[in-house]
Amino acid sequence: MQGKRAVVLLSGGMDSAVALAEARAAGFTCHALSLDYGQRHAAELAAARRVAAAIGAAEHRIVALDLRAFGGSALTSDLPVPESPTTGIPITYVPARNTVLLALALAWAETLGAEDIFIGVNAIDYSGYPDCRPEFIAAFEHLARLATKAGVEGTPFRIHTPLIALSKAEIVRRGLALGVDFALTVSCYQADAEGLACGRCDACRLRAKGFAEAGVPDPTRYRGDPPRLS
Amino acid sequence: MQGKRAVVLLSGGMDSAVALAEARAAGFTCHALSLDYGQRHAAELAAARRVAAAIGAAEHRIVALDLRAFGGSALTSDLPVPESPTTGIPITYVPARNTVLLALALAWAETLGAEDIFIGVNAIDYSGYPDCRPEFIAAFEHLARLATKAGVEGTPFRIHTPLIALSKAEIVRRGLALGVDFALTVSCYQADAEGLACGRCDACRLRAKGFAEAGVPDPTRYRGDPPRLS
């Protein structure tokens, strides 16, 4: 017998891969959803396909939405990705990204008759994005129940954030315990077409720090040197 | 001098045309946003272009997002549009439609540095969609402040719903007072390529009732008989 259905947001990075593994471990039949938002790191979408297959999603859909129409982020427009640490909310922030992602996940969940949505946000090592915080997730869960026919009819939509309180090192350990092959994932903001990581951007540094602090080898394929960790 | 910027969601129907006119009347520089969500009534997008130009939007962008990938609505998939009154939430409901629309409007607003979003939802003659109710709008406004860099930094995003408490007749009167040419708008769920209305669907009936109750001639171009109003 199949478990209950869940929609799982899957970027191709390490966090969403672990979120998918958590959803599978919890017994859900997983409908993985990726957004092709005109991001520079299209290698992430190829990674998302590999991860969905490896972890056993029942299906994987990629929805195209060209957020480049709005501009405003180093991930969707022609601004350079910073290669050294910055303070505050970084230029790689995509405006309202998780609001858009969760809105699409909600639309699909309602169509599927699913009550559960998984998103791999993290409020600890999270690059300072406001839409990764627990209060944002709680507000969206509240919204989902008011926004939909299913919600009005009593469906208690749940937004699962299994990684929200974990450090990157804990995410690495949890993923390994669940059998996630991190070599399949791509986190780099400027990975090349083969998925080779730059080793310099925020995402590369956070990821490498996670492996180092977890005390396990970093399986990331870099096109040059791995990140220098201070 | 230009007024403050606002993002105005524009479908091409009569309600959003009046919402745009209200935003202009309030002195906003208007950035009109339409979603091409694979809807049957593509004639609405042509209407949106005409309306944006006629009412004086500073710009108009159409973002493509194929919600047909999810199915589940008579407006985006192959289910028939009902041609007689139904009860409850109708099959023309698009899952999480206004959540998706507002998420995209929020993304663009943040990029523009705008604090104001207009949406022509209506909770009186509203076909029973849950995401047209004031409690949904309030929940989204709360979410917007938590979801964004601008919100965290103190921007009080406002979702304006100038039509939310009006009857269709009041919307007609208000639109005429603001100089809206309703002949440019298309509301029909199954308008043909020339924008001719079916005269039978829910949207046609609600619209015709609005003109009748306002006591003004209905400028809608029907491909057959106008709706019979009981």
Image (cartoon, coloured by chain):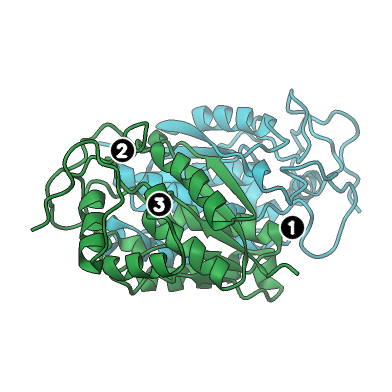
Chain colours: A green, B cyan
Q: Nearer the viewer, residue A36 or A185?
A: A185
Instruction: Point out the frontmost of discs 2 and 1.
Output: 2
Who's the residue at 87% across and 42% down the image? B200
- Chain letter for mark 1, please: B
Instruction: Point out the frontmost of discs 2 and 3.
Output: 2
Whether residue B163 is visible: no
Expressed as whole percent of the image width and height from the top left, the position of residue B94 reads 68, 52
Task: Identify residue type, mark 1.
Answer: Ser
**Would you name the residue on which mark 3 appears?**
A97
Secondary structure under the numbered disc 1 in the rendered image: loop
**Would you name the residue on which mark 2 appears?**
A196
Expressed as whole percent of the image width and height from the top left, the position of residue B136 reads 55, 66
Task: First in sequence, mark 2 or 3: give its number.
Answer: 3
Task: Identify residue type, mark 2.
Answer: Leu
Spot the residue most to the top. Answer: B194
- Please tell me how crowded label 2 is: few (under 14), some (14-19), or many (20+) other residues with Cα within 10 Å: some
Expressed as whole percent of the image width and height from the top left, the position of residue A50 reads 50, 46
Q: Nearer the viewer, residue A83 or B216?
A: A83
- Chain letter for mark 3, please: A
Expressed as whole percent of the image width and height from the top left, the position of residue B39 reads 68, 38
Spot the residue most to the front. Answer: A217
Quadrant for the N terminus of chain B, please. top left
Q: Nearer the viewer, residue A136 or B1?
A: A136
Above or below, B188 relative to B88: above
Looking at the rendered structure, which numbered label has been put on residue B127? 1
- Label 2 and label 1: CA atoms lie apart by 51 Å
Whether residue B64 is visible: yes
Secondary structure under the numbered disc 2 in the rendered image: loop
